[in-house]
Image (tube, helix red, strand yellow):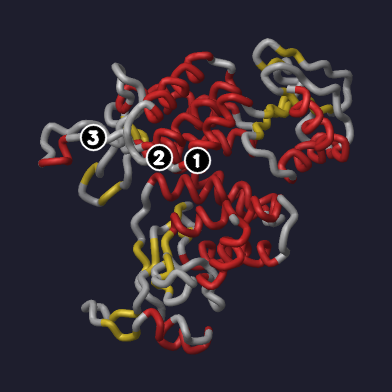
Amino acid sequence: MALHTLDRQQALVDPVWGGFYRYAEQADWSEPHYEKMLTIQAANLRNYLEAIQLGNDPSYRTVANSIVNYVWNFLTDHAQAHFWESQDADLRSPDGATLLSGSEFFALNVEKRTIQGHPFIDRRVFTGSNAHMAEVFLKASWILDRPELYDLALRVIRKLDKERWHPDRGLLHASTGDGVAVAGLLSDHIQFGRALVAGYQAAGDNALLQRAEELAAITQKLLEDAESGGFFDRVPEQQGFGLLKMPLKPALENFYTALWYLDLFHLTQRREFKVTAERTIRSVISRQQPVPIALMGTVMDRWFRGSVQIAVVGEPNDPRTLALIEEVRRFYYPGKLLRRFNPEQEPPHWGEITFPYHGEPVAFACTDRLCSPPVKFPEDLHENIFNIVDQN
């Protein structure tokens, strides 16, 4: 069913500039709403990248590249290393009058669009959507063999890390010219936390993992319900009006928070992250509220089966080390986590496990219960992972 949806929704891809329109107004994927949002591009790109990893229809690679090209060409400020938020559906004059509707403008070829101009681009820079796009660009960089995406994604993550922390209020949602914007939104904390974890796995930069741990602590301090567990969607505001005074504990964001804390637990072996994840899961499932069933299934699977942790030990510039890392990135396995160890700089310890190293790059695949034998050749890694999963 999921792949059927990926096939059908390709009707919403702009055939000229690439990228996805926001949604279809009809159930048969016709009559698009032509706005293009950064969050829509990021979510769809992730889906098509995973479909590529599963080895299905090659058209998925074409769609993924079209999303990347659109974001790269229209929604990226390369000089400042950030992503813009959206592009309007209609072509409008400076005073707001509609010159061409979306259905008229997006039916034009590239030459006629160039003559007409292009719909307005919202150049606001939001923390959560920028982090989300950067995280997915990291994944796209090796699946689509586009290293420029890796470089941009790390620049975006590091710039957010530098500019969006507030010592008392959490992450800033955006920066404005006249002062500090809204801060402490759960969605921003989750997305940026996941981007930091992805950046750590991609670059092997321990500073990014340390920042993710610091962010997790701030998130608990500002947003966790200390009595009942779970996380509020925003910091309570005494000055709010009506329902704005009442922060919520949305199921979707709390499930993603639980997944983030589980990843931090497996990467750091700090048990408090696992305890927080469990409290969050219990909080969601104990309340009478609609829940995203597929995401709940993912969370419960991760909770009961754990993740697959893959350690690669070797000199970072050794081609054999890089080949093992590339193979880890290539194949799809939900909840897969990667840590690299440079034996010249740190002992290869992961929790209570010490990995043997005898001068040659080697990989190990582990669950919470057992580890594979040492793997020296990339072509043997996939089989070893599924062997230990079967034995788990």
Residue beneath label 3, please? 247
Left or right, 292 with respect to 70, comes to left
CA gap, disc 3 and disc 2: 18 Å
166 sits left or right of 106 in the view? left
Q: Position of residue 44 (x, y in %)?
A: 53, 57
Label 3: state its secondary structure: loop
The amino acid beneath tag 1 is Leu
Residue 260 lies, in percent from the top left, at 50, 31
Q: Earlier in the sequence, mark 1 or mark 3?
A: 3
> Percent x, y for residue 353?
72, 13
Alpha carbon separation for disc pair 2 and 1: 8 Å
Q: Residue farthest to the top?
A: 352
Q: Which residue is mark 2?
A: 291
- Nearer the viewer's eye, disc 1 or disc 3? 1
Locate residue 75, reporting x and y percent. Answer: 46, 62
In the image shown, does 32 or 74 lie closer to the viewer? Answer: 32
Q: Can you tell which mark lies on residue 39?
A: none
- Tag 2: amino acid: Val
State the residue at coordinates (52%, 86%): 109
- Contact flag, marks 3 and 2 (Cβ < 8 Å): no
Q: Name the kind of residue labelled 3 in the image.
A: Pro
Which residue is label 1 attached to?
295
State yes or no: discs 2 and 1 in contact (Cβ < 8 Å): yes
Residue at image location 66% in from the left, 67% down from the top: 62
**356 left or right of 198?**
right
Crowd class of label 3 (few under 14; some 14 to 19; many from 20; radius 10 Å): some
Q: Secondary structure at mark 1?
A: helix
